Structure formats: C-alpha cells, structure tokens
Image (tube, coloured by chain):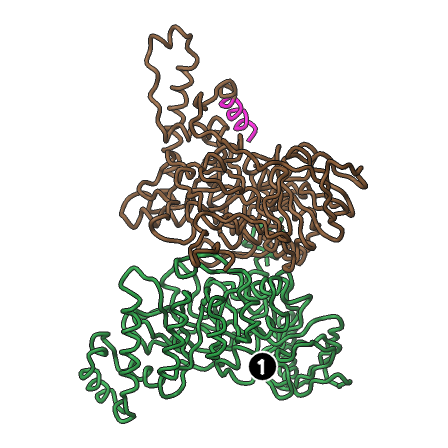
C-alpha cells in the first residue's frame, strides 16, 4: 500500500508545474451576482453547514459575503434588518447531482440532451453545451433553498463528459450562470447502464469486465497524451518554435485534466464491489475519485470510502428500479457519514427535479434512519450532507457551503426547522442578494414560463 | 439436548402465536385520527380477532395492553396506485408481471401477485397496509384491470380481483388525442350495445367481435369484451390518467354521457378546472409533491394543487412515482399540508378516501366493527422521518423486520466477521 502511494506521488509531482487550462478560456464564467444588499439577519437559529448549531444568533451580510456571525451584532443604518426570531438559517443548499438543463422540463425528445450515447467514451462532450438556460425547474429548486447545483451528463457512457457547477440565478447564457472558478467534473458510470446501452448494440462494453477494460484503455491513452503535452511544455521557447505543437484532442484533454488533478471525478456507481474496482483503477492511473454517486451499496464499503477520502453522494431511499439498486438500506447515508469514527463524507443528492426541491426532507429521512440504526448524529451534522459536503465534492468548499466569514453569502431563511416537512423556504440570498422572497412573492420566471397558459400570466401564477 | 430445547421453544412460539390471535389487544391513551373526523381525540381502541371491537374515550380492558400515550394512531395507509406484488426489480423484465401484449382491456394482474415480494414488508414497515395494484397501460386508451391486496404477506391472498379499470389520454407521439377520444367513445358505444345474452359464452362473444368494427380493429378477445361489459353495466371504477385542463373537461363530458364511475389520476392541471371537477363529483388521485411541468400536458403543475382542490370539496387520494417506495405518499401528504391542505384532509386521502371511492370494505376507518388495519406511529405520520412503531393488519401485530433492516444490522454489527458469516 505504501509503495503504491509513492508511485502516485511521483506521478503527480511533474504535473504540479503544469496546467492544462487553455490560456484564454472561451467558456469562462461571466457570472455577476444581483446587486448585493447589506443585511443583518437577527436572532436566527442557525445550522452553519460546518456541523455547528447556534441559537438566537445574527448573521451579517455585506458586499455579497458573510461578514460576521455572532450574538447581538451592532445595528447600523447601512444594514437592512431581517428579524429571524424563531426561524432557521442555513447555507444555500447544494446539489451535486442534477440533470436540470440537460434534461429540462417539459421532458421532450427535442431538449433531452444529457446522454451522448453514441460511443462508450465521450470525454470530449461538455454538459454546459447542452444546457437549456430557460429550464423552468431552476426556479422551483430555488424555492427549495438550492443556490448551487452541479449539472452532469447522464450515465449511458463509461465516461460521459464534463459536468459544470452553476449558481441558481437564471440568466440567458450558460456562461453567465457558471460558478466562477469552479472546477469542471468528469462523469463516469459503472454497471448496468453502459453495458446495457452498448451491449444491446452488440458492441463493447456488454459486461462489467468490459466496462473496466473500457475505462483502463481510455486512461492509458490519456496518460500518453499527457506525457506528450508535458514533453512539449518542458521544451525551451526556441525548441517549441522548431517543433510541432501536439494537436489538441478534446477527449484526451479532459481525461488528462483529471490526471493532472484539475477536473474532479463524479462516478455513478451502485454496487460496493464495483466501487472498490473503480478505486483500484483510480489508483492504477493516479487520479482521485471525488464522489461515488447513487451508491446504493456504499454502506457495505463505508470504511474504504472514508480511507480514500471519497464522498458518497446518495439518495435517502431510492431503490429497486435496477438490480444493482436492490440492496437499499435507509441508513446508507448515515453509515457512510459515520465511517472511521465520523471521517466519512456523506452527501444527499437528488438526480431529480422534485427531489432537489426537498433535499432538507431527504436529509431528514436519512438522519432518522441513522438514529434508528443506533448512530448518534446531530441535525447540525446532517445539514453538512446538503451543504459543505457537496461543496467539497464539487471543489467549491473554500468559497461556499457554510456560513463562515468571508464565504459567499449564499443563505436560506426557513420558516421553521428545516428537518420538518412543514418547513418552507422564506428567503434565499445568493451572493448577498435576494433571489427569492416568499413574503413579497419575489421569484424568477424563465422565458418558458411567460404567458404559456394564459398570455397575461406566468406559468407559476396559474 | 440443545435441539430438544430449541424445539420446545418453537412449539411454545407456535402456541403463543395461536394465543395472540385470540387475545384482545388494547391500545391505550392514543391520539386517534380515525380517518373520517377532522379532529383527533385521545382515546382507547380494542382489537378483538381481526376487528376493532371498541373505540372509546373511556377506559377499556384488554388482554394485551399497549400504552400509546403521546403517540398518534391512524388507519393503515392504502396505496392507490402501486405495482406492489407485480414488479420486483424495475429494469428486470423477468420480475415484471404488469403488462400484456395480448389483452387490451380485460388484462388483470391478480393471478401474478407475489406475497413474498420484498417491497411488501418494506412499504408495510413504512405504514402501507393495503394496495390498489395497477398494471401498465395497454395499447387501448381504456383497458387493464387493477386489484386490491391486503399486505399481510400470506401466501393465501386476501384481496379482490379486477375491481378497477385504467386508461389514459393525453399527448402522445402516435396520433392525435382526438383519435384517442374517438376510440374511447367507439369502445363505450360498443360496450353499451352488448346484451347479457351476447356474452354468455366465448363463442357468443367471438360472434359479437366479428360484427363490431371497433372490436375487430382493436383485436379484442372475449375477456376484453367481458371487461367492457362490466365497465358500463356494473359501475366498475375507471381510473383515467390525464393532466391537461382541456382533457379533464373532455373526461367530465364522457363521464356524464356514458354514466361512468370516473376517477382521474395525475390531474396536474386540475387547479384550472377545479369547480367543474367538484360539480361532477369526480375523485382525483394526485401526487402532491409533483410540481414539474413534465410534459406539455402539465404546464400548470403547482405545489399548491392539493390545497386548492380540497377547498372545492373534491375527494382526493395520493400517489407517488410507481417505483418501490409507495409509502412516500406520506411525504407527499406532508408537503400538501405545508402548502395549504388541511391535516385531516391529507390523512383522509391516505386512508378512508380510497376505501369509499373503490369500495374496499371495512378498512381505512378506525371505528367499531371495522377491520383492524392500523398504525401506531413514533411521531407525526406526515413527517417523512417518522416511522410506525406497530402495524396491525387484520388485527394481527405484524413483525416489522425487512430485508433492509436485516442488511442494516449486517453492516453495523459484528463487523469483524466477513459479511457472509454475520447474522
């Protein structure tokens, strides 16, 4: 084991000085928040997303950031005061697994753009180039407190392409919704889906061993591509002028980005034995799996996930739609969370436009199941499952995912404790600006919503 | 010696089980939502045999006493749109018994029901005690028969077969919905034209089919024709899946024209025509958590639907996606309450309403003489985090072990053993 680690380290060192990012990024985020407000939220009960709970505490929002958190913060005229006595405040909810935009509503053939199911390895495709920015589902998720979500390609392919993290502010280009500086992800998929899709066409993969061979062949090509690029980059300017610049390859560029540690791996995988195999493959080629998604059997290898610092992005109770999803236990999330005495990283994800609106309820079910299984888990800790942990898996936990001074002011005010089904989102702030306010009926409507039932109304007002 | 002892234990166990059934069970000091009345009351409930023999605010005596102080007791929840017992694993066709390529209208799933499906203990441990199990839609816009099952896991099935017909209308990639309505009307006209003498033998029916262009066009079999006859002559409930407001109005028209016992399922745009639905007294099965404009038929989907419909006095029942967790209608009910429905109304939608709409007998209501299908909850049943502490079906205290609880034990206890050697 030790020897293996050394190999990984020696593989990684040369990459540290090397960046694959194309110099001027044509797809760079142009996200701009709404005009930020200066707000003092007073006397709130708070789950801060880092596992702490505060009562009757104030949160100060200034210039789009969390400026302070504490009791009886000084009141000045510059701040709009929100009395949150008896209410609950949490960080903006984050979903690490969404297909909004790539499988928008209405679910029709003409905008179902989530699976480039024409080849088992399509690392060259990017979800953001499929996303329909007018999907009416974003606004619904916002009312569920979701401020950030990660949009992934589907799971038809072994390697399905790049995912993208967005802020939940509906805009008319994807660039203007992209979370600034968030890393891309690579969607990979185990198990039944790729082997069914391609096996039915009588092509590889048609078995799980075919799946494994498919990933490994791709990583071998990526490793060679990366060395070639690095060789070129290591040359003097003069030599660079003389020689040929290696041709870019979109597919291998993405895979090399993973090997270089710039792109996270989001791996759809249900069965425990397959997750263990995927960890072996990651070790073989020296990349890191950020999270296993769906992982209905994650509880069977919870310690292994914790040892490898891999999150489990899981449902509270979905199961049985496939054979690989048959061994569901409702304590799955709690068991992953509690692995190695609480070193586990558990995430509640949705993969669903209804579920994303109620991630607090999904966390509540998962917590209740954990308590029934005998674990001692606080609500404050369970709140991490839908805030800081998905932020960590997406590589944005340094700037969002918890109510901490200096972080983005992505904040939700709930009518009551968010672990109750009766809790409603009252206000959502994204980067310190009101994005939703239940009381004043301030809410976004996508272009799709406008006049589509009655010409003089928006869809949601019907 | 050890074996001998074990056998005695077994014998005692069997004896005990026999005894329990004849013993009365008193549930004391429970907060009772009886399914019918709006306000709960703190009271006592006595189970004798398979029935509720007394329910009272005053003291009762029973052989076994369960103190339910501070606990909510409700009727067992009825899943009104499930595949319980006929689908084990969604994507595994060899475990699916929910569709037919041959029969268009008279296809029923009763004979396929598997009381040993692992979905049954799972949903039961979450509060579902019986199920209206429905097949997939057939190629005909009306057709396919659902059955009622009591989820006691006994191989001797307690249930009623073929008590409801299903159908659907809406946007589709093959053909106009106007064509769908034409087919429905042709089928209904054909059904009305049938005399009892026409359907005495299969040979008689075959003759009728030969004489009917719609029956021939639809490739109907005698069992399809019998089901159609039952639909128009025996008041068989017809659950039509439809969502668009204009479709809901068209279905109201058909109900009135053909005197159908119509229930509409989906009904995502019902909020736009709620008064008309109420006036025609049509019960609805809705998924209150579904606010997605999932198709062009569902553009008006809204999270406030249940509350809006309740205000019009419409009888409501709930469904959840047809995927294993039918108990999630509890969460849906909680969401409905959070968005404006009354608590008692939501509770009734989960319990008594399906019994009244589909004629499911003496269930869904906690009252003297009713069958004792009931739940003692550890907390508010509309909170998805709550679970039953006890489930009674036909008066029997049901073991709440599930495959899921067994697997949980396996991976939280005795972890030093390889999993194959754990309990």
Assign a secondary structure to mark 1. Answer: loop
Q: Where residue A56 sits: x, y (%)? A: 78, 47
Quarter residue B15 falls in? bottom right
Q: Is residue A145 magenta?
A: no
Q: Is residue A64 left or right of residue B149?
A: right
Mark 1 belongs to chain = B
Q: Where residue B109 sits: x, y (%)? A: 39, 75
Furthest toward the bottom, the residue is B197
Between residues B211 and A349, which one lies in front from this camera angle? B211
Q: Is residue A291 left or right of residue A388?
A: left
Q: Residue at x 39, y 5 (%)?
A: A238
Say if A233 sits above or below A154 in the image.
above
Q: Where residue A32 sits: x, y (%)? A: 54, 33
Say if A434 sits above or below A12 in the image.
below
Q: Residue at x 39, y 84 (%)?
A: B259
Q: Which quarter of the rendering shows the N terminus of chain A?
A: top right
Secondary structure character of the magenta stretch overall: helix
State which chain is coloured brown. Answer: A
Mark 1 lies on residue = B394
Can residue B122 be seen here? Answer: no
Furthest toward the top, the residue is A238
Q: Is residue A130 left or right of residue A424?
A: left
Q: Residue at x 19, y 86 (%)?
A: B207
Count the numbered circles shown.
1
Q: Colour of chain B?
A: green
Q: Is residue A3 magenta?
A: yes
Can residue A328 be seen here? Answer: yes
Residue bounds of the magenta highlight: A1-12
Q: Where residue A146 sits: x, y (%)? A: 57, 46
Say if A150 sits above or below B243 in the image.
above
């Amino acid at each position: 084991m030790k020897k293996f680690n050394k190999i990984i380290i020696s593989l990684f060192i040369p990459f540290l000085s090397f960046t694959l990012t194309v110099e001027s990024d044509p797809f760079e985020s142009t996200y701009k928040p709404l005009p930020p407000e200066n707000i003092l939220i007073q006397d709130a009960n708070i789950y801060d997303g880092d596992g702490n709970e505060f009562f009757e505490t104030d949160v100060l929002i200034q210039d789009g950031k969390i400026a302070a958190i504490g009791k009886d913060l000084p009141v000045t005229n510059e701040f709009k005061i929100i009395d949150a006595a008896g209410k609950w405040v949490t960080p903006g909810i984050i979903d690490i697994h969404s297909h909004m935009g790539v499988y928008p509503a209405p679910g029709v053939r003409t905008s179902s753009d989530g699976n480039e199911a024409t080849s088992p390895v399509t690392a060259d495709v990017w979800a953001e180039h499929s996303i329909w920015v007018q999907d009416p589902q974003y606004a619904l998720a916002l009312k569920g407190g979701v401020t950030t979500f990660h949009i992934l390609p589907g799971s038809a392919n072994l390697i399905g392409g790049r995912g993208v993290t967005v802020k939940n502010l509906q805009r008319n280009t994807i660039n203007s919704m992209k979370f600034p500086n968030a890393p891309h992800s690579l969607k990979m998929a185990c198990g039944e889906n790729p082997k069914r899709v391609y096996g039915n066409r009588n092509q590889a993969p048609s078995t799980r061993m075919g799946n494994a061979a498919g990933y490994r062949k791709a990583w071998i090509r990526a490793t060679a591509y990366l060395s070639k690029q690095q060789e070129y980059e290591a040359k003097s300017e003069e030599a660079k002028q003389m020689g040929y610049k290696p041709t870019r390859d979109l597919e291998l560029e993405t895979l090399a980005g993973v090997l270089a540690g710039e792109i996270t791996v989001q791996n759809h995988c249900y069965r425990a034995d397959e997750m263990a195999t995927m960890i072996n493959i990651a070790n073989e080629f020296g990349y890191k799996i950020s999270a296993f998604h769906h992982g209905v059997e994650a509880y069977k290898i919870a310690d292994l996930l914790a040892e490898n610092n891999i999150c489990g992005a899981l449902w509270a109770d979905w199961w049985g739609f496939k054979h690989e999803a048959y061994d569901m236990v409702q304590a799955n999330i709690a068991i992953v969370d509690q692995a190695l005495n609480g070193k586990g990283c558990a995430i509640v994800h949705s993969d669903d436009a209804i579920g994303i609106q109620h991630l607090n309820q999904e966390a509540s079910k998962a917590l209740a199941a954990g308590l029934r299984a005998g674990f001692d888990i606080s609500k404050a800790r369970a709140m991490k499952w839908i805030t800081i942990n998905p932020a960590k898996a997406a590589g944005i936990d340094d700037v969002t995912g918890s109510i901490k001074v200096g972080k983005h002011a992505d904040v939700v005010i709930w009518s009551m404790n968010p672990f109750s089904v009766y809790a409603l989102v009252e206000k959502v702030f994204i980067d310190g600006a009101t994005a939703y306010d239940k009381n004043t009926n301030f809410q976004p409507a996508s272009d799709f919503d406008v006049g589509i039932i009655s010409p003089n109304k928006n869809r949601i007002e019907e | 010696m050890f074996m001998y002892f074990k056998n005695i234990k077994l014998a005692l166990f069997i004896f005990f089980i026999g005894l329990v059934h004849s013993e009365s069970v008193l549930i004391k000091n429970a907060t009772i939502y009886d399914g019918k009345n709006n306000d709960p009351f703190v009271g006592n409930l006595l189970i004798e045999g398979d029935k509720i023999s007394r329910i009272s605010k005053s003291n009762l005596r029973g052989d076994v006493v369960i103190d339910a102080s501070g606990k909510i007791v409700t009727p067992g929840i009825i899943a009104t749109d499930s595949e319980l017992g006929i689908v084990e694993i969604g994507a595994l066709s060899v475990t699916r018994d929910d569709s037919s390529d041959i029969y268009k209208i008279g296809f029923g799933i009763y004979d396929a029901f598997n009381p040993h499906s692992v979905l049954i203990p799972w949903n039961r441990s979450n509060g579902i005690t019986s199920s209206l199990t429905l097949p997939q839609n057939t190629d005909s816009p009306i057709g396919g028969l659902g059955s009622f099952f009591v989820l006691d896991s006994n191989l001797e099935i307690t249930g009623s077969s073929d008590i409801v017909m299903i159908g659907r209308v809406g946007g589709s990639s093959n053909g106009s919905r106007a064509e769908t309505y034409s087919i429905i009307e042709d089928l209904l006209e054909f059904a009305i034209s049938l005399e009892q003498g026409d359907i005495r033998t299969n040979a008689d029916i075959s003759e009728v089919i030969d004489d009917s262009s719609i029956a021939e066009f639809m490739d109907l079999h005698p069992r399809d024709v019998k089901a159609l006859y039952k639909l128009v002559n025996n008041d068989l409930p017809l659950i039509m899946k439809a969502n668009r407001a204009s479709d809901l109005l068209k279905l109201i028209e058909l109900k009135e024209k053909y005197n159908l016992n119509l229930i509409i399922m989906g009904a995502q745009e019902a909020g736009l025509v709620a008064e008309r639905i109420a006036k025609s007294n049509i019960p609805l099965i809705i998924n209150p958590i579904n606010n997605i404009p999932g198709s062009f038929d569902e553009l008006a989907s809204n999270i406030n639907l249940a509350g809006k419909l309740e205000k019009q006095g419409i009888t409501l029942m709930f469904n959840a996606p047809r995927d294993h967790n039918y108990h999630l209608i509890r969460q849906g009910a909680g969401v409905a309450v959070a968005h404006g429905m009354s608590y008692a109304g939501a509770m009734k939608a989960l319990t008594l309403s399906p019994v009244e709409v589909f004629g499911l007998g003496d269930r869904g209501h906690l009252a003297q003489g009713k069958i004792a299908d009931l739940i003692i909850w550890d907390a508010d049943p509309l909170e998805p985090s709550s679970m039953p502490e006890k489930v009674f079906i036909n008066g029997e205290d049901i073991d709440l072990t599930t495959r899921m609880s067994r697997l949980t034990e396996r991976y939280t206890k005795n972890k030093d053993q390889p999993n194959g050697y754990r309990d």
